[in-house]
Amino acid sequence: MAYVIAEPCIDVMDKACVDVCPVDCIHTAEGERMLYIDPEECIDCGACEPECPVEAIFAEEDLPDEWKHYTQINADWFKNRK
């Protein structure tokens, strides 16, 4: 299980979650519209979730049904960057 960043992050990209992540698993790149959590690096500590001002971060099992596809979106972003 990992944490997932979902739709509310799009075009907001507040980086408070990045600052509290102890393993630096939250990334983005120039031109991207949201942040992404690397499911391979995430240690499931939950430090990022309360820091998000738009409530875009969820534990995978708590992700609302309409945003379930963001689990794959986050994972694919990292696969495509390697």
Image (cartoon, rainbow, N blue to C red):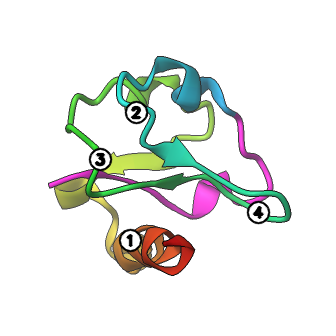
Label 2 residue SS: helix
First in sequence: mark 3 vs mark 2: 3
Question: Which residue position is annotated with label 2?
Answer: 49
Instruction: Answer with left or right where residue 44 lies relative to residue 71.
Output: left
Instruction: Answer with left or right where residue 13 lies relative to residue 53.
Output: right
Question: Which residue position is annotated with label 1?
Answer: 75
Label 4 crowding class (10 Å Cα cut-off): few <14, some 14-19, many 20+?
few
**Magenta span covers which residues?**
1-14
Label 3 residue SS: loop
First in sequence: mark 4 vs mark 1: 4
Residue 41: give its label: 3
Question: Which residue position is annotated with label 4?
Answer: 33
Label 1 crowding class (10 Å Cα cut-off): few <14, some 14-19, many 20+?
some
Instruction: Name the residue rendered at 35%, 48% in the picture.
Output: 58
CA separation, marks 4 and 1? 16 Å
Q: Position of residue 9 (x, y in %)?
A: 64, 53
Q: Position of residue 79 (x, y in %)?
A: 43, 76
Discs 4/1, front:
1
**Against 7, is 59 above or below?**
above
Discs 3/1, front:
3
CA separation, marks 2 and 4? 19 Å
Marks 4/1 in contact by CB < 8 Å: the verdict is: no
Instruction: Name the residue rendered at 47%, 76% in the picture.
Output: 73
